[in-house]
Image (cartoon, helix red, strand yellow):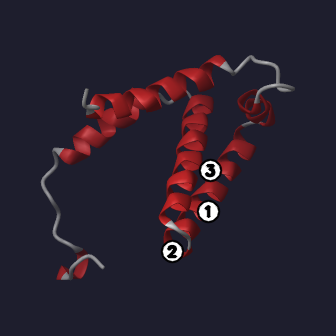
Amino acid sequence: MAKSKNDDVAVLEHLFEVIESRRDADPAVSHTARMFEKGLNKIAQKVGEEATETVIAALAEPRQALVAESADLLYHLLLLWSVKGVTPAEVYAELRSRANRPAKPAAGGGKDK
């Protein structure tokens, strides 16, 4: 049976649910619970670190490293959403609204690089 785009979205939504369920878990056994315990500043710092590692992987490492770093970035981004009370549905709605806007001409009339 072929996988649908909805299956991919479901993976992110399931991961978000798992993250939410670990909010009150034992930090001694759950990395997610430890991150919640460390708080917003540490989680935001971790998102920045993972974003940097993703960029480095894109520029200088094999394709699989980019895939792995992207997964790490998405996990930490979902964790950040959770701690701030943002849901995936809110982000999806924002993306949908942007997709429905007319395209803007590039600044300076040049092409994307």
What type is the residue that disc 2 sits on?
Leu
Left-right relation of 89 to 37: left
Q: From the viewer's perspective, is 93 left or right of 27?
A: left
**Which residue in the rendered view is the most extreme toward the front?**
1
Lower sequence index among marks 3 and 2: 3
Q: CB of mark 1 within 8 Å of CB of mark 3? A: no
Please name the residue that numbered disc 1 is placed on. 53
The dot on residue 11 is: none
Q: State the image quarter where residue 34 is shown.
A: top right
The residue positioned farthest toward the left in the image shown:
102
- The quadrant in which the N terminus is found is top left
Q: Secondary structure at mark 1?
A: helix
Residue beneath label 2, please? Answer: 59
Instruction: Tell me if mark 3 has few (under 14), some (14-19) or many (20+) residues whose alpha carbon lies within 10 angstroms of its own.
Output: many
Name the foreground residue: 68 vs 84. Answer: 68
Label 2 Cα neighbours within 10 Å, binned few <14 / some 14-19 / many ≥20: few
Tell which circle, 1 or 2, labels the residue nearer the N-terminal end. Answer: 1
On-image quarter of the C terminus: bottom left
Instruction: Report how far apart the C-alphas of labels 1 and 3 lie in the structure.
Output: 10 Å
Q: Quadrant of residue 35?
A: top right
Q: What residue sits right under mark 3 in the picture?
A: 47
| Badge 3 element | helix
Bin the neighbour count of mark 1 within 10 Å (Cα to Cα): few under 14, some 14-19, many 20 and up.
Answer: some
Which dot, 3 or 2, sits closer to the camera?
A: 2
